[in-house]
Image (cartoon, coloured by chain):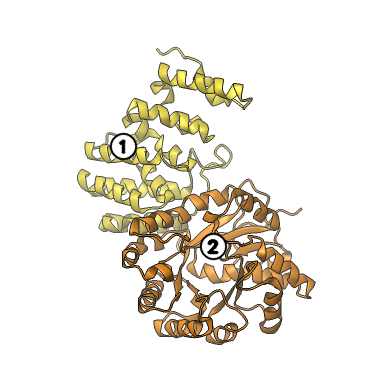
Chain colours: A orange, B yellow
Amino acid sequence: MRIFDPHIHMSARTTDDYEAMYAAGVRAVVEPAFWLGQPRTGVTSFVDYFDLITGWERFRASQFGIRHHATIGLNPKEANDPRCREVMAELPRFLVRESVVAIGETGYDSMTVEEQEVFEEHMALALEYELPVLVHTPHRDKLSGTQRTLDVVAASGVAPEMVVVDHLNELTVDIVADSGCWMGFSIYPDTKMDEQRMVAILQRIGTDRVLINSAADWGRSDVLKTLKTGTLMLESGFTEADVDRVLWQNPIDFYNQSGRVDVTPLPGFEALLAPPLFEGNSVQRGAPAVQA
Amino acid sequence: MTTPEEWMTQARDAVREKPGAALRWLAQAGLGVGRDLVDEASDAKGEVLGTTADAARADLVAVLAVTQSPADFATTITTLYNQGDNDVKRGVLRGLNLLTERGALPDEAVDAGVALVHDSFRANDPRLVASGMGAFAGAHLDQETWRQGVIKLVFMDVSFAAVAGLDERRDAELERMARDLVRERSSAGRVITTDLSTLAEPIAKG
């Protein structure tokens, strides 16, 4: 199984995690900019963090055979702090970086006016820089928050296929499916979604426009939830091609709307074992895998 | 589809016309010309010779040097380095190396470049530190900082092939530092690289 985790906060994780992920088949990740648990109080904290996730963390991942990409944005929680909001002026220099494959996480947390303004600014940047957008949905009042999220997306002029609405569940998936946006699901040990519920949703809606992530961070989370979901998909009657579609091709198709995704094998690590089924797919880049 | 050569021409023209917009071109040089290693056989990690994108960025820095006044060029490379990711930072340092190899640099550029090299030595990315130890540092860095840079490369497992002017600049103090490190590593049962053991031996200087 080859895996692209489309949402994981690796700067909060250990090298043991990287080793376990590589062993599980993870070859590429996207690390969205988000909050750190401890609120930031100024712009320079953000700038250093953006440099971290587009610099040191990308290099660190490469030492473990994993291609690392980032999304850049002011997260909705800190969008409420005027001291943090000044970072919006600093985003453009990060948005031109080759490691940045989307804008985000943006969206609503408490659904304040400030969050909405910053969300709309991000959507405007997405148009200007021709980048996809990763949209976080609130944990509280989720259904109405998700509906309002879709309203902002629709009003922004950004095409729905350029947007993934993340952290969905049984109650919010259908309105996002109808909107034409991509559907993101975070599989967590306790909260959000678990593997069984995820597979049940896939059985109902299929694999199109679905992204499955571990969203692992500094909280109780599991970097191998993507693998575990894929394994349960196979046990539940999905084919290997279905699993590859959800866990590998879909993240590439979504994020490579930026033109910046790199899933070529890192030199010095064993070559990716590409199933013949996907040869000739124009999205997959790089040399074919070494035949074992 | 733009070829690497076409992209390079566009980038050079754009940078010449509007030096203030150089960041975007340096940032996306990998997309423009690719990120292949210059010589995978001798430099598998790209620490010494770098990548095609590194070379493209260095070329654009050299274009800026002949386009702008020395003072403006100094400001531009500082801004590019501060606002760029490690790829761009490396490109700036490699640009300074390229310009040093081509001839004398104005004082303003030297002063700005030395500050950037100092910054690169605080990084933990071996490719960045290695770029900081090229021809520019060989010609302009003070001896004390330069020695620290050489020893840092040992810790980062970077080949001394990345160090410009090693034989000319090595001195008794650097050799003492190398011998101390050999002793420390020997007592810990660790491997002593050929680079390190060679540095620990005093050489006769003509």
Q: Is residue B174 left or right of residue B60?
A: right
Mark 1 vs 2: CB contact within 8 A: no
Residue that carries the numbered disc 1 in the rendered image: B114
Instruction: Name the residue located 66 percent from the left edge and 61 percent from the top edge.
Output: A224
User: B95 or B126, which is in the foreground?
Assistant: B126
**Residue B191, position as x, y percentages in the image:** 62, 27
Q: Is residue A228 above or below residue B130?
A: below
| Residue B69 visible in image | no
Mark seen at residue B65: none
The picture places residue A42, in percent across and down from the top left corner, at 34, 59
- Residue at image position (59%, 77%) is A209
Total number of numbered discs in the rendering = 2
Q: Nearer the viewer, mark 1 or mark 2?
A: 2
Q: 10 Å neighbourhood of mark 1: few (<14), some, or many (≥20)?
A: some
Mark 2 closeness class: few <14, some 14–19, many ≥20 residues within 10 Å: many
Q: Chain of mark 1?
A: B
Q: Residue at x 36, y 45 (%)?
A: B92
Q: Could you say where residue A237 lies in the image, as x and y percent from the top left?
A: 79, 75
Q: Look at the numbered disc 2 and give the secondary structure of its residue.
A: strand
- Residue kind at label 1, given as amino acid type: Val
Front-most of residues A85 and A69: A85
Quarter that holds the N terminus of chain A: bottom right
User: Which quadrant of the view contains residue B28?
Assistant: bottom left
- Would you say residue B17 is visible in this rendering? yes
Residue A38 placement (x, y as % from top left): 44, 59
* A14 relative to B76 in the view: left or right: right
- Identify the subunit bearing mark 2: A
Q: Which residue is mark 2?
A: A30
Q: Residue at x 37, y 47 (%)?
A: B59
Query: What's the amino acid at mark 2?
Result: Val
Residue A109: which quarter of the image? bottom left
